[in-house]
Amino acid sequence: MWRRFARTLIDGPATERAPALPDRAAEELARAIEASARERLGRSLAIRQVDAGSCNGCELEIHMLNSIVYDLERFGLKFVASPKHADVLMVTGPLTRNMHEALLRAYDCTPDPKWVVAVGDCAANGGVFAGSYAVAGGIEAAVPVDLVIRGCPPTPVQLLEGLLALLQAADRPRPKPRQASAPGAI
Amino acid sequence: MDPRIEELRALLGQGTAMPCRPWAHARLDRPQWERLLLLLAADARLELLSLWAEPGVVLCALRHEEEEEFVLFSLACPDGTYPALSPLRPGAVRFERMVRDLWGLVATDAVDLRPWLDHGRWALAAPMAARPARREAPPAPTDAPQPAFLPVEGESLHQIPVGPIHAGIIEPGHFRFTAQGEMVARLEQRLGYVHKGTLGLMIGKPARAAATFAARISGDATVAYSIAYARAVEAALGVAAPTRAVWLRALMAEIERIANHLHDFGFVCNDAAFAFIHARTGLLREGVLRAAATAFGHRLMMDRVLPGGIADDLTLLGPDAIERALAAIEAELPDLIATYENYASLVDRVVGTGAVSAQLVARFAAGGHVGRAASRGFDCRKSPGYAPYDALDFAVPVFAEGDVDARVRVRLAELQESIKLVRAILADLPHGPVLVPLAAAAGEGAAMAESFRGEVFAWVRLDESAILRGAFLRDPSWLQWPLLEAAIEDNIVPDFPLCNKSFNCSYSGVDL
């Protein structure tokens, strides 16, 4: 362990190694998020992830955002444990009928203003699972969606790009508080 | 010769032989099914691997532990019932609940017949049955029946309900803890939240088109699922995948195993407050995923394995990218393992925590790291075995302690075996085509593939135009989830995340 600490003194921390994002575009994107988060929101965005039926592929990639390679928190974006602490619900999966109520409740627990990001092709419109007896459709079948990040699953870089788009959208006038779909309205 | 194995073979001969390959499949009549139950009662070495159904027919997959015999039995259920297996094999409980929810077939004398996947929120009852019943008034999302939990009696007990939405970035499921102070008296799981009706979507599709769904039953094991499914289809059709494709499949499967074992190792340490190891394994895992993207065009290698071979050959840059990722792991892993072993606070959390006995593991026939951490050495790459593993030299690490630490050690040892396997595969990669067309023929096939979690079992039935008429994919977690309930008993509530991560069962894989 001490050897490692010593080596870190020479190498510098992995997070600051910009090549951790090898793609130049991603590097710029990362800087852009940082700038606009500060300018436009003047605060950080707290994200609550909700799996509403995914195959868990999307979760694997969302996890990587928290890794030292992408280190999401340096942009002021961080994952929180409760929807009550969240500004953004990041929802994956086709919306299964068995998760419909849980998602509605999580949405209702999230204070306004709030944004919903649908992550993955399934969250967009049910994806390959659309039409199943057990699937209500995309996330929009239950809650209003502000942004869709496509991909099966989207890569961490695509997820970062999507979050940038969200920050730009957040620059527009705040959305009026909305109601989730009324029970039984699907 | 063991008289009981003789009896098993006799039963196979007496039933109607079904055209399944390569596993023998006998359709039994009711008296023969009753004799099968007697055999299960008499011979503990006969393991239940899976239980599922088709409209009006129940099927089970068994393995004889000593003889390494893998067989299927089925029973037509014209009255919608079949004699239960759950009094004899506890692993059958959730299968029987699932069979009733999806196909409407009821196990008589079953241990537990509460609904499992069906939360009363679908418009159909028994959606996979020949004629599913339409529910009169489909329930509103917020108006579904409350689940019934098993009663717990005793003094000073309190309940802690957790989920379906958990605090981390993980899949949804409900855990009902009954605790006495900090001590867990019972955990009951209630899953089914991510049931997508995947099997129903597969039926009626051409075998190759349905591979998309097999790849999405559990995304973290997408390669292993695709291999199990492809091998079952190929067996049913009598088609052989090209040798190069078979080797590249194994290459992908081992890369998937390396990435997932790194992930799990990091997460277990993270739950014991060792974020440092988690941070480093995350970095190494990212290297593996990028190498996979370079080599196969997708970070998780989803949809690369198809019935008949693989979608695309390995790229020219692939081998170097893979070698770089492996070299980075090898350079750092000894350090990380030393850290894991040398910190008393970490050792204190993982050693002796969440222990599962070898007897219990054997009764449930749990595979993967759950089985191998508790003396059950089953690995389907060795037995029944499949190409190219028969031509490769690797060890299957087995530990006896059955605790969180043993499950971590199984992963660490397998990780190192997989690195060797990847190198051996790259060194000996045969040349040739990677995809052959599928014949259009009727047939039935069964196969397994070893995922990072344990063996994935696949069974398919195809009609004359190679359209899928029956399918079942069994996640290894079916037989591991119930053991998590046992592992946490008499442990403290705060150790649950640690136990859970050390199992890392799939929710989507069992919810289907």
Image (cartoon, rainbow, N blue to C red):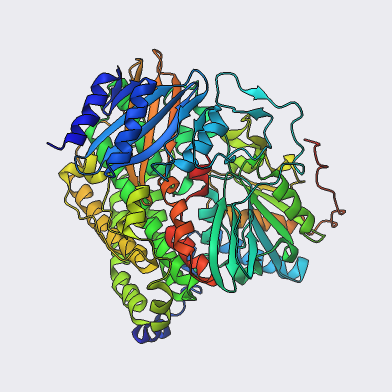
Q: How many marks?
A: 0
Any part of residue B395 in sight: yes
Work out which residue is located at the far top of the displayed protein and give it.
B464
Q: Foreground residue, B46 or A25?
A: B46
Quarter of the image with the N terminus of chain A is bottom left
Work out which residue is located at the far right of the displayed protein and give it.
A176
Any part of residue B216 in sight: no
Q: Which residue occupies 50% across, 24% down?
A: B203
Q: Which residue occupies 21% across, 35% down?
A: B4
Residue A74, percent from left and from top: 60, 71
Q: Which residue occupies 58% across, 34% down?
A: A129
Location of residue A98 with respect to B72 vertically, above or below: below
- Toward which corner of the image does residue B459 lie, by quadrant? top left
Quarter of the image with the C terminus of chain A is top right
Q: Which residue occupies 27% across, 21% down?
A: B238
Q: Foreground residue, B129 or A113?
A: B129
Residue B324, percent from left and from top: 31, 60
- Toward which corner of the image does residue A72 lie, by quadrant? bottom right
Q: Is residue B91 left or right of residue B493?
A: left
- Toward which corner of the image does residue B214 lie, by quadrant? top left
Q: Foreground residue, B478 or B413?
A: B478
Residue B32, percent from left and from top: 33, 24
Residue B164, percent from left and from top: 63, 53
